[in-house]
Image (cartoon, helix red, strand yellow):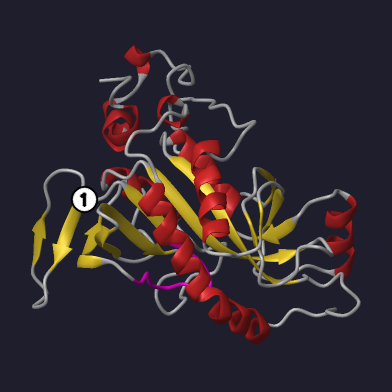
Amino acid sequence: MPSQKKSKGKSTRTKGPAAEIGVIGGSGLYSMSGLTDTRELHVKTPFGDPSDAFVVGTLEGKRVAFLARHSRGHLFGPGDINFRANIYAMKLLGVQRIISVSAVGSLMEDLPPGEFLIPDQFFDNTKGRKSTFFGNGIVAHVTFDKPTCSELSKTLAHACRAANIPVREKGTYICMEGPQFSTLAESEFYRAMKFSVVGMTNVTEAKLAREAELCYSTVAMVTDYDCWHPGHDSVSVAAIIATLNQNAANAQNVLRETIRTLSNERSCKCGSALKHAILTDPKLVSAQAKKNLAAIIGKYIQ
């Protein structure tokens, strides 16, 4: 349940949807400029605590919830993030669309640091992450051949062009476990597979967002050439953060333009992803499972 943090530490519960658009900021993006009428919301979920409090406010006439994926101060590495709590909390807040802003390494010569990619595909190379809300007596298989929302992705690409930011509209994001960066052999393998960028977080979010019937798309901000490029054969956090800081204003402009131009109504299929996906006989679903997953299965199983 969401609660509002007051200046003296008191909390009061909010009523109704707090936000319609969610923004998840990755490494280097721990806040969102331009939000007005802001407040912090601490959201409790059946899956534990999200990475941080949500900063909820108004931007371009729409209610937006911002979450720092790694927390403000960067306390959580990619393998320590409670992805299920983050996405479920978005659902509890009333969010329908999630925009991820993430740092990535480029695997392509013509996709240099400073440019943006709006990937349309993911490849999951993580190891044992909790990337589903289901299990424990309830089974669902959502379609995931098109893992991002094309409607949201098109709006993001348009926003990049409107902000005069070089952008590539399609490509494959390979999600590695981390927290270490790639070995040279791994980086060369990714390139041989014709992947576009490498990151450590987004595919897990995308899977959970699909199960939660939320639109999801990524603004992949290229910070480096991974380690394959002979002229850039090492990756340092300092270099990545320097590039992220240079691109921070660009990311904020893209977010503002995207939110301004997004239609109020969704015409995609993301909002009905579970319609034919739940295989378990509703009569056999436990009361606890119904309670834990009420925000995402409530319209299908009472």
> What residue type is disc 1 on?
Ala
Identified at 64% across, 69% down, the residue is 179
Location of mark 1 (residue): 18
- State whether the magenta stretch is mostly helix, strand or loop: loop
Expressed as whole percent of the image width and height from the top left, the position of residue 260 reads 36, 53
* Residue 294 part of the magenta segment: no
173 versus 210 height, above or below: below
Expressed as whole percent of the image width and height from the top left, the position of residue 49 reads 33, 58
In this rendered view, identify the residue nearer to me: 168 or 52.
Answer: 168
Question: Which residues are drawn in magenta?
Answer: 24-33
* Residue 32 part of the magenta segment: yes
Q: Is residue 184 left or right of residue 64?
A: right
Expressed as whole percent of the image width and height from the top left, the position of residue 93 reads 26, 48
Identified at 42% across, 73% down, the residue is 30
Q: Is residue 41 left or right of residue 206?
A: left
Is the residue marked by circle 1 packed among few (<14), some (14-19), or many (20+) residues within 10 Å?
Answer: some
